[in-house]
Amino acid sequence: MTDDLRAAGAPTLEDVARAAGVSRATVSRVINGVRNVDPVIQEAVRHAVSVTGYTPNRAARSLVTRRADAVALVVSGAGVEPAAAEEDSDAGASGRDGTGDAGSFTAQVFADPFFGRVVTGVVNYLRPRGMHPVLMFAETSRAREEVVAYLRQGSADGALVVSTHAEDPLPALIADAGLAAVLYARPARPVPVSYVDLAHQDGARLAAEHLLGRGCRRIATISGPLDVPAGQARLTGFRDTMARHGHPYVPTAEGQFTQESGEAAMERLLAEHPDLDGVFAANDLMALGACHVLREHGRSVPGDVAVVGFDDSSAALACRPPLTTVRQPVEGMAAEMTRLLLDRLARPDGPVTSVIFEPELVVRGSA
């Protein structure tokens, strides 16, 4: 910024126009993202903005564009309602004010490395475009109503929804309200909303074929929650591949995508099938828990029991030995989800769509 501009105070549109050699109206068109402006002129205006240090007035810009330049990143589920939580409070389900379940839901979200990777992908896509995400949680009917109201009043231009429960009603509520949204993962019930997802059954197939290729023959699996489509798909893909290779029965213990549930499931499987020599856990946190239990029982990994996880999250590298896992490109999927939403905002009448990513086996020390 020049000394004259510093002395005059905050730079204005007129300052940018003089620096770029164009009209004030042209500068406004470029800053507000109006199409059909010559690329050379756009570059000149952007350079002038950089030189002058001009910062657009977001509130004034919103009046012109009718955009908030923000999107809601919503982590949604089908949690305990406040009234029900109060009734269960004596059993430790919640505090008297009904907020305990919400706190538990939020704590679980932040404990799972998956959600951090989603945020990274979203932020990295939005930041260069001058937009930002607003993190919201929707685990009760009241919270879901607040999300819909927030979107209706224009506080965010659209929603990126990560559902944690198959019975989550939020995607349908958003679709019925005619609001712009994109989902991470295929909805359990068909709704006219775009989504990104992974070919989960193909990922489970990679895990089964790897364990069989290592010579494992007494293989068990720790499934994800079976009321979640990803949990169902990974179990189906694993069982189907095992059956195709002559293994019609696969011992299974259901987990909840947490390390603790992986530990509990591994304890059950060892008690019922002490001779098992291979385990597929439907996410890395459960695989990490399984490895802990195997070590406690004196089983070496992978010498006695080979273990394969799913996601290729930070938990895979924290595991000892490092975890062989099926990679889910979460950051790329989250970025694509964001791109689809911005495309929907630019073309509100465009068709809904889906983008399915391919998994990849990452071989490390555990199998």
Image: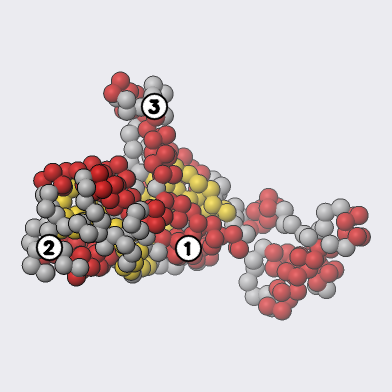
Front in this rendered view, residue 276 or 296: 296
Quadrant that contains the C terminus: bottom left
The tag on residue 272 is none
Q: Residues within 10 Å of mark 3 (few under 14, many from 20)?
A: many
The tag on residue 98 is 3
Q: Position of residue 87 (x, y in %)?
A: 30, 23
Q: Is residue 278 above or below residue 48?
A: above
Q: Earlier in the sequence, mark 1 or mark 3?
A: 3
Q: Is residue 140 left or right of residue 23?
A: left
| Residue at position x 32%, y 62% in the image | 365
Residue annotated with mark 1: 335
Front in this rendered view, residue 272 or 114: 272
Residue annotated with mark 2: 217
Amino acid type assigned to the residue bearing label 2 in the image: Arg
Helix, strand or loop at label 1? It is helix
- Distance (Cα) linking label 1 and label 2: 39 Å
Amino acid type assigned to the residue bearing label 1 in the image: Ala
Of labels 2 and 3, the one closer to you? 2
Can residue 62 be seen in this snapshot?
A: yes
